[in-house]
Image: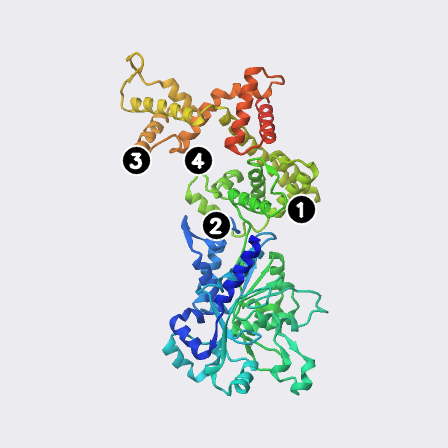
Amino acid sequence: MDILNKVKQYREEEEQLKWEGTFREYLEIIKRNPEVAQTAHSRVYHMIQKAGYTEEEGKRVYHFFGDEIFGIEESIENLVEEYFHPAAKRLDVRKRILLLMGPVSGGKSTIVTMLKRGLEEFSRTDEGAVYAIKGCPMHEDPLHLIPHHLREDFYNEYGVRIEGSLSPLNTMRLEKEYAGRIEDVMVERIFFSEDKRTGIGTFSPSDPKSQDIADLTGSIDFSTIAEYGSESDPRAYRFDGELNKANRGMMEFQEMLKCDEKFLWHLLSLTQEGNFKAGRFALISADELIVAHTNEAEYRSFIANEKNEALHSRIIVMPIPYNLKVSQEERIYNKMIKESDMAHVHIAPHALRVAAIFTILTRLKESKKNGIDLVKKMRLYDGESVEGLNQGDLDKLQTEFPDEGMDGIDPRYVINRISSTIIRKEVPSINALDVLRSIKDGLDQHPSISQEDKEKYLNYISIARREYDKIAKKEVQKAFVYSYEESAKTLMDNYLDNVEAFCNQNKLRDPLTGEELSPDEKLMRSIEEQIGISENAKRAFREEILIRISAYARKGKKFDYRSHDRLREAIQKKLFADLKDVVKITTSTQTPDEQQLKKINEVVARLIDDYGYNSTSANELLRYVGSLLNR
């Protein structure tokens, strides 16, 4: 009964939000809150702004899109700041169709759906409240009732600009129902709803021979002509086209460039002048955000046709490329899996990350100027620190190929291959190798992959496999280290004591005998050699560590082995190197003795408790790493 109670509560809340009154009373609302009279573009912009944003690496990350769109923050920022923001300020941008252009499964439809769902919710808030002339099929703006010659006076009094003319139907209603008294015209609050066709319209092209322009602009109701006597009587017209119903909100054109030309002609006047022609009436005003989406090939074909030049000049193209960050691609897969019926299947840690590595490699372009290989480029894009490279290198890479991310493998392909693995194996657990194997098998079945691309992709699968080998070995070696954090801390403290004594030319005191000892050069070099610190560079590295410790102390922060990336890597590698033989023997023994079996069980338990594996995937990981170490 909980769900029914929530439905009842929602219904009651909507009843409380409803409002109805005269135009005179509506003007009082506007006087208190001029935002009520904002344009459709302004409403969308304020909806996005209300959700907030954070500044990350000099870019704005808008929370409105945060739970659904990953890795294309820069494209979203461009969309908001270059289209919605100026359009909200009534600049000329709002007189353009917004065309989202990008590869399949890149997030275009998701962005549009989020805007539609967001508007539905926003119209239920005080900031997003929308009012319309009661009984109007186009939910027309009540301010259209103000005569044109008084609109300058209205602006001076209320600070609100009025655009558009009263529709033919409401012009007739004003005379017949209200005897021209605009102050008595009834106004009501409306709530956007795609299902109820209020403020949100969707148009999808179909067979040009069967699709009628009435789908966009409405049509004559022939059953009423006898009653009203003329086709030009607005009461004999159904204002039920998508452009009519989308008034005050947004209109989505699915695959707009596939539409017949006659459907697109209506958009010329609608975008530039804010009106369109319907039936035997004067131009009908409409205030709506028009959003379309298409792929790059169709867009190139569209602009190549000279007949489309007028419409092309009224389009603002926003590229929506694929995500190019491994960590964000992993989030996309997690989201898609949670939305499916396979959320119960255990996917071993790093399985999705390895799939993401492969996918991102297919989308990146090899740098010709900078000599940086794809793996380093991939890591740099994902925010990882790469030795010898800095922010300047990242900026150069990102500007080298403006169309980077507009092709490559799409997320749905990877999810389809994961799904295929689960269905075929009928197991409750899959790992990284299962996923890579399935991706490889699926390349033969992919219709749009050329032989040349297939060879490149097979190479990327090999690279992803090598990356996984490193991850797997590190994961097992970490699990083998008993009290890993404590071991790392002990080793680091010992190293730092010796580094401090070395740099300050001091002796160390043995804690047991009290004997003075020289710094342990062998220990320090055994750690430093793990990350390639040469004999000549050791002093500079050690002094760098002391400077970092001093900087942390001044800021009142605690320095540990994770406070310095290269020191952390050196400590980890030293610990792993000491344990490598133990790991190798224990994981590869066919008949482990009691001590080895105990160790294996401890490692499996740690992999399950601390790293997110289940029993099956933990044992598979151990066997695989054992085979790697024995090669």
Q: Residues within 10 Å of mark 4 (few under 14, many from 20)?
A: few
State yes or no: discs 3 and 1 in contact (Cβ < 8 Å). no
Q: Nearer the viewer, mark 1 or mark 2?
A: 1
Q: Residue at x 54, y 49 (%)?
A: 404
Q: Residue at x 46, y 78 (%)?
A: 23
Q: Which residue is mark 3?
A: 551
Q: Nearer the viewer, mark 2 or mark 3?
A: 3
Comes first in the chain, label 3 or label 4: 4
Q: Residue at x 53, y 27 (%)?
A: 605
Using the numbered discs, state the Cα–Cα distance from disc 1 to disc 4 in whole angstroms: 34 Å
**Mark 4: secondary structure:** loop
68 in relation to 441, above or below: below
Identity of the amino acid at label 2? Thr
Q: Residue 449: give its label.
A: 1
Q: Nearer the viewer, mark 3 or mark 4?
A: 3
Q: Is residue 271 left or right of residue 568?
A: right
Instruction: Residue 347: give x, y in percent of width and height.
Output: 59, 37
Identity of the amino acid at label 4? Glu
Instruction: Residue 593: give x, y in percent of width and height.
Output: 58, 15
Identity of the amino acid at label 1? Ile
**Mark 3: secondary structure:** helix
Q: Nearer the viewer, mark 2 or mark 4?
A: 4
Q: Which residue is mark 2?
A: 399
Q: Residues within 10 Å of mark 3 (few under 14, many from 20)?
A: few
State yes or no: discs 2 and 3 in contact (Cβ < 8 Å). no
Q: Residues within 10 Å of mark 1 (few under 14, many from 20)?
A: some
**Mark 1: secondary structure:** loop
Q: Which residue is mark 4?
A: 387
Identity of the amino acid at label 3? Ala
Comes first in the chain, label 1 or label 4: 4
Using the numbered discs, state the Cα–Cα distance from disc 2 to disc 4 in whole angstroms: 21 Å
Q: Is residue 456 left or right of residue 66?
A: right
